[in-house]
Image (tube, rainbow, N blue to C red):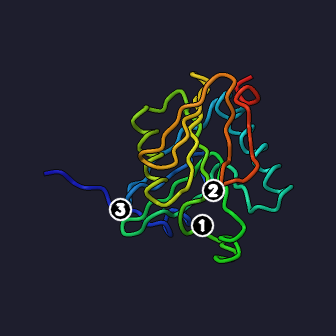
Amino acid sequence: MTIKPRQVTAEELLEMPEDSVRHELVEGELREMAPAGNRHGYVAGEFFGELRNHVKANNLGRVYAAETGFKISSDPDTVLAPDAAFVRRERLDEVGEVDGYWPGAPDLVVEVVSPNDRHSGVVEKALSWLGASCRMVLVADPERQAVTVYRSLEDIRILTGRESVDGADVVPGWRLPLSDIFA
């Protein structure tokens, strides 16, 4: 007989005591997240910093750092925490200040691939963000020095070399050369 683990809710996740382990919640299943390594942290920091500077200078919305939870589905609950995220000003004004997890997906998500990440897991997470109405998902791979840009299931583009990430209509005016983050 197989015993199915008890599902966890977003509220229970939020109330868990602080320990040294990061968690995400996927369809009620609690998943531990290993601490990020040096390259991962550097690349995530570069994306966050460049995005934050542009968004703040142009009053476009708010940028969130790693470990910020976004509740993207309910019953069972899914709470994901990207390495960086952007929510546009109009949505911030509409929703107001939130104490717990942001209700829904951000407009832009940045996920940085860690050495222990499985390719299928990273793609699954990108598709989860898109399924929750995220408008753009950037998956940065420090090992390959590439960024995969997901806009929809049909609009997926891989950037390498001297190319730049472009915020397009999601983060207007934001442009980040890959050479700046994979230096």
**Label 2 vs 3, first from the N-terminus:** 3
**Residue located 49% across and 29% down the image:** 116
CA separation in Å, label 1 and label 3: 20 Å
Please determine whether, in this image, residue 31 is positioned above or below residue 131: above
| Residue visible at 57% across and 29% down in the picture | 141
Disc 2 element:
loop
Please tell me whether mark 1 sits on a helix, a strand or a loop.
strand
Residue under numbered circle 2: 68
**Mark 2–mark 3 contact, CB under 8 Å?**
no
Q: Position of residue 140 (x, y in %)?
A: 59, 34
Within 10 angstroms of label 3, few (less than 14), some, or many (20 or more) residues?
some
Q: Position of residue 142 (x, y in %)?
A: 61, 26
Depicted 64 relative to depicted 71: above or below: above
**If you read the primary sequence from the N terminus, does the residue marked by circle 1 or circle 3 appear first?**
3
Which element type, helix, strand or loop, lies under badge 3? loop
**Residue drawn at the location 32% of the way across and 61% of the way down:** 6
Res 101 quadrant in image: bottom right
> How many marks on residues?
3
Whichever of callouts 2 and 1 sits on the residue coming sooner in the sequence is 2
| Viewer-nearest of discs 2 and 3 | 2
Q: Nearer the viewer, residue 169 or 129?
A: 169
Amino acid type at mark 2? Thr
In this picture, residue 9 sits left or right of residue 151: left
Please state the horizontal and vertical placement of residue 39, each as a whole percent of the image: 67, 27
Corner quadrant of residue 25: bottom left
Figure quadrant of residue 96:
bottom right
The amino acid at mark 1 is Trp
Vertical order, 175 against 63 (above or below):
above
Determine which of the numbered discs, if any, sits on residue 7 in the image.
3
Of the pair 92 and 66, the residue shown nearer to us: 92
Q: Which mark is residue 102?
A: 1
Q: Nearer the viewer, mark 1 or mark 3?
A: 1
